[in-house]
């Protein structure tokens, strides 16, 4: 009976210490549930069948990521419970003095963990079920699904999964707790509260040296990833990451001492009100947790980057679609020996290629063997070689006739272009390539195709494409006057059109029959040629949309999942440290009150301490992110990076909610802890 | 000149079923420039008395006037201002902030009064010299001896030029040599700087440095001794005599 009473009373009594722990557990459980329950909810909504595959893919990815997330949460929970154990050493010392066996103490801890575990699981699951209903609105938005079929749902599978994962985590906590109980020594426990704190103020010169080295290291890494990415390779990226991590650690090692020295020099600021106390408190906090601060900073950095990149990729994927995919379907065929056109091949198989299409454009693209990428770029070829080593610059450039392109533009619903007999236009929308081509156009625009000399109408590339897709992937197409091409140089046959259908269902039906025809044609070609040499592509708007939206949604979703878990971890570590620090500092605040400090000044000192403590890792993380994102954007270039502002805003909102939430809870809790008890002030 | 007037104060603890009278009708006066010691056994109510005067605790009944201001009526901000401007505290366990150096601990008392930094510097150095702690100013509490810590705490109490210094068992945690040194310094502050000091102690040796000793037993004033023009040794003997009279329950008061 006693064995149950003690743990329950302990929890009740130290609710203050446990509040953040409990809060974090509940948050962890509910996030875990929400993200694992999404599958069930997506299924509830009318997501189109091919997109359903993507939902399935997302579910598999999420369960994979969940293992990773679970290990992070487990580490966090073990850290937090060890932290709370340390805080209670005097209590354990009392038990041991009274003659309680270590086994009994372990049993008490075990019961506590079970009670807290069950409590947090139940509360977390309830919170999660509530939250997931909100989340489904977001999911519907991500998938552009229709919410009408939506019902309140609870995922049994997700509940089961959450219970299993967290039971394992709590089991680890129990093992770790009883492990530390067996290692406890009475003398250490009794003395633990009495040891006076040693203030180590590191040598200022050493601080300056460490800080300078760290800043230089960071500067180098920033320069490499953000401005010198052309020369990056895997090895260099590895070096930059290692450099970034080390420099972050070094900055937190030295920043407290350095800042304090600087502020101490400013005597007017330092000796104003409680400033000296405030800065000393911060500096001692930061210098006792250099490692945690660095880890928190890096986690925040990963969070900011993954959230922003994921959102902006998702946004631009969706916005790109409207401009880059203006027609229902496109068949692209690379001309082979006697099979010189799609129409003939279709006819040979008993089809008419135009069947099922309302309006269409059918044209051919040409190639001049002597007019290669290397030729057209001239001196700029070196830039290409440096930036895009994988591109084969001996391939011929793609050439289309102005009349064909104008027909295509008309189908796309755009204005036609005009061209004189001796002019040409370069179409290109792939940013990296466009820059190189623009440089080449600057140097000299005269080209020779099929023996005819032409010069560029514009001094820059024109935005445009002939093949539909989800991303800006057109690396370059030459539009030339009709009479400049030799008819037998055609190398590609391109058929583009809109289905003879209005509603989505009708379009899906047409597409189904089109797909069957393509399968037959592919089989026919496979019988005739070596499989690797055939290029027959059938791209459709429905396919591209599904793939793009699915990809964007998965990215955004995983970004959210990992980002929020990382944020919770960061917030929890800082909050625990700050709260325990507040408990330790109660006598200090009592002293301040006794010498007559105003309550307002004490509150503002506490606010500054908590604020700077939370801000320091965030500031460095934001600086990291500015450069890290430049790199991420470069890598994600083909997806397009429009809507960055919106993504950053969204990321900030999430950051503010989770991290800011922890800050507020911590501040209010700390204020409550240090509020005067022994001294009357009313 | 009358500085402090304690008028029929009472302090009760507990509830109706079990009431403890920590202070039971105490009245006395302290003049400006006096050095008063309050003695009594553990539980006699002497610390409660000091806490009531220092506004850390509230009286149940009665009034306390400092410079004709009723401190029992003070609240909130006015109370805090009163504490930081009129009172200087010295505690048994020093109550120094361990994250601050000695200098900063002393300076803090001035900076919370919104004093200018150059003014703070000269004040701190002056008071440090008076208390003989100039060489430990840049040290942290954990680097100092108990005696040094208590002198730093005393410096913090005196630096604001308070109306009265309240010391709660200032020698309680010190060895005899440090105790002697501290008491000599307090006497110096009292004699040369004209500081008014009120000290609670159960150490007769420390009390013998005072000009007047008030003995408290069971929450009431039991006896009062004045040193007059006599020397400290003679005063010490008189104190011992009273303590012997106080009875067996005051055996620890040596």
Image (cartoon, grey):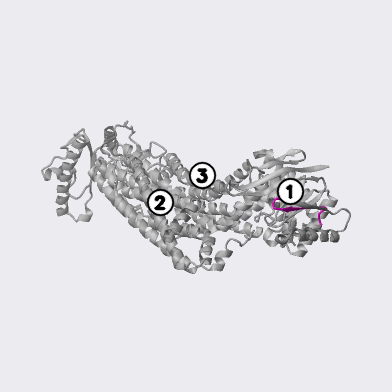
Task: Give the secondary structure at mark 3.
Answer: helix
* Image coords of residue A235 (percent x, y): 44, 60
Which mark's residue is nearer the viewer, 3 or 1? 1
Residue A396, disc: none
Q: Chain of mark 1?
A: B
**Can residue A453 be seen in the rendering of this structure?**
no
Task: Give the secondary structure at mark 2.
Answer: helix
In the image, taking residue A136 as reference, residue B143 lies left or right, namely: right
Find the distance from the CA under tag 3 to the CA under tag 1.
35 Å
Which residue is more in the foreground, A481 or A339?
Answer: A339
- Residue identified by numbered label 3: A664
Give the extent of the magenta segment: B209-220
- Residue identified by numbered label 1: B88
- Badge 3, how many Cα within 10 Å: few under 14, some, many 20+? some
In the image, taking residue A151 as reference, residue B105 lies left or right, namely: right
- Residue identified by numbered label 2: A28
Q: Chain of mark 2?
A: A
Mark positioned earlier in the residue sequence (3 or 2): 2
Task: Give the secondary structure at mark 1.
Answer: strand
Q: Reply yes or no: does residue B215 show up in magenta.
A: yes
Question: On screen, B224 above or below A543?
Answer: below
């Amino acid at each position: 009976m006693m064995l149950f009473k003690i743990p329950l009373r302990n929890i009740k009594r130290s609710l203050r210490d446990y509040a953040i722990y409990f809060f974090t557990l509940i948050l962890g459980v509910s996030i875990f549930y929400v993200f694992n329950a999404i599958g069930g909810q997506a299924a509830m909504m009318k997501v189109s069948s091919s997109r359903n595959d993507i939902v399935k893919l997302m579910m598999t990815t999420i369960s994979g990521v969940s293992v990773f997330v679970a290990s992070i949460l487990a580490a966090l929970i073990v850290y937090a419970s060890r932290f709370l154990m340390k805080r209670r050493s005097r209590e354990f010392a009392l038990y041991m003095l009274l003659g309680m066996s270590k086994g009994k103490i372990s049993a008490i801890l075990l019961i506590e963990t079970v009670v807290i575990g069950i409590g947090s699981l139940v509360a977390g699951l309830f919170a999660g079920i509530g939250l997931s209903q909100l989340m489904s609105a977001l999911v519907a938005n991500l998938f552009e699904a229709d919410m009408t079929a939506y019902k309140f749902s609870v995922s049994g599978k997700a509940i089961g999964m959450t219970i299993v994962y967290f039971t394992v985590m709590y089991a680890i906590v129990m093992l770790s707790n009883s492990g530390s109980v067996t290692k406890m020594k009475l003398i250490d426990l009794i003395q633990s509260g009495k040891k006076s704190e040693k203030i180590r103020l590191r040598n200022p010169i050493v601080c300056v040296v460490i800080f300078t080295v760290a800043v230089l290291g960071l500067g180098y890494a920033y320069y490499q990833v953000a401005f010198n990415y052309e020369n990056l390779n895997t090895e260099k990226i590895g070096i930059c990451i290692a450099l970034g991590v080390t420099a972050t650690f070094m900055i937190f090692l030295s920043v407290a001492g350095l800042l304090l020295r600087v502020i101490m020099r400013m005597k007017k600021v330092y000796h104003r009100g409680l400033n000296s106390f405030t800065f000393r408190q911060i500096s001692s906090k930061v210098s006792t947790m250099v490692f945690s601060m660095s880890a928190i900073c890096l986690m925040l950095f990963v969070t900011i980057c993954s959230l922003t990149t994921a959102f902006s990729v998702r946004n631009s994927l969706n916005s790109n679609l409207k401009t880059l995919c203006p027609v229902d379907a496109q068949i692209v065929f690379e001309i082979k020996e006697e099979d010189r056109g799609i129409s003939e091949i279709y006819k040979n198989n008993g089809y008419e290629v135009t069947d099922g299409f309302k309006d269409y454009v059918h044209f051919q693209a040409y190639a001049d063997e002597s007019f290669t990428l290397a030729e057209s770029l001239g001196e700029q070829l070196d830039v290409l070689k440096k930036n895009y080593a994988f591109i084969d610059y001996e391939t011929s450039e793609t050439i289309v006739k102005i009349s064909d392109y104008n027909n295509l533009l008309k189908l796309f619903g755009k204005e036609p272009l005009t061209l004189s007999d001796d002019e040409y236009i370069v179409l290109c929308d792939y940013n990296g390539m466009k820059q190189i081509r623009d440089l080449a156009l600057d140097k000299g625009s005269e080209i020779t195709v099929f023996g005819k000399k032409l010069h560029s109408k514009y001094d820059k590339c024109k935005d445009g494409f002939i093949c539909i897709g989800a991303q800006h992937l057109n690396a370059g197409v030459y539009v030339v006057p009709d009479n400049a091409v030799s008819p037998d140089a055609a190398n590609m046959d391109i058929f583009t059109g809109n289905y003879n259908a209005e509603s989505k269902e009708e379009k899906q039906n047409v597409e189904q029959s089109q797909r069957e025809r393509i399968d037959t044609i592919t089989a026919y070609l496979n019988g005739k040629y070596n499989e690797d040499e055939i290029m027959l592509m059938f791209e459709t708007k429905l396919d591209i949309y599904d793939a793009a939206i699915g990809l964007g949604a998965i990215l955004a979703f995983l970004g959210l999942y990992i980002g929020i878990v990382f944020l919770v971890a960061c917030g929890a570590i800082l909050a625990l440290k700050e709260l325990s620090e507040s408990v330790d500092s109660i006598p200090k605040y009592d002293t301040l009150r006794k010498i007559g400090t105003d309550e307002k000044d004490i509150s503002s000192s506490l606010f500054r301490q908590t604020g700077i403590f939370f801000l320091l890792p965030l500031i460095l993380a934001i600086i990291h992110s500015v450069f890290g994102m430049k790199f991420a954007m470069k890598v994600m270039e083909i997806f397009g990076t429009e809507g960055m502002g919106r993504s950053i805003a969204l990321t900030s909102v999430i950051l503010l909610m989770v991290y800011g939430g922890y800050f507020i809870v911590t501040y209010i809790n700390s204020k409550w802890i240090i509020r005067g008890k022994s001294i009357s002030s009313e | 000149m009358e500085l402090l007037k304690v008028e029929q104060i009472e302090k009760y603890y507990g509830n109706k079923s079990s009431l403890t009278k920590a202070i039971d009708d105490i009245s006395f006066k302290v003049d400006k420039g006096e050095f008063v010691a309050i003695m009594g056994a553990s539980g006699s109510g002497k610390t409660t008395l000091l806490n009531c005067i220092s506004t850390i605790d509230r009286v149940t009944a009665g009034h306390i006037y400092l410079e004709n201001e009723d401190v029992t009526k003070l609240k909130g901000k006015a109370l805090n201002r009163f504490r930081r401007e009129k009172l200087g505290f010295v505690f048994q366990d020093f109550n120094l902030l361990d994250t601050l150096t000695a200098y900063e601990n002393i300076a803090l008392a001035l900076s919370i009064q919104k004093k200018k930094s150059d003014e703070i510097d000269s004040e701190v150095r002056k008071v440090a010299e008076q208390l003989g702690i100039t060489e430990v100013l840049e040290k942290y509490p954990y680097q100092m001896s108990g005696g040094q810590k208590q002198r730093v705490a005393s410096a913090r109490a005196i630096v604001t030029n308070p109306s009265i210094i309240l010391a709660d068992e200032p020698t309680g945690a010190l060895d005899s040599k440090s105790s002697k040194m501290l008491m000599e310094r307090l006497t110096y502050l009292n004699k040369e700087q004209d500081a008014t000091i009120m000290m609670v102690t159960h150490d007769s040796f420390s009390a013998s440095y005072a000009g007047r000793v008030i003995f408290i037993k069971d929450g009431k004033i039991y006896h009062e001794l004045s040193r007059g023009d006599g020397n400290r040794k003679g005063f010490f003997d008189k104190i011992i005599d009273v303590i012997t009279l106080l009875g067996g329950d005051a055996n620890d008061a040596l």
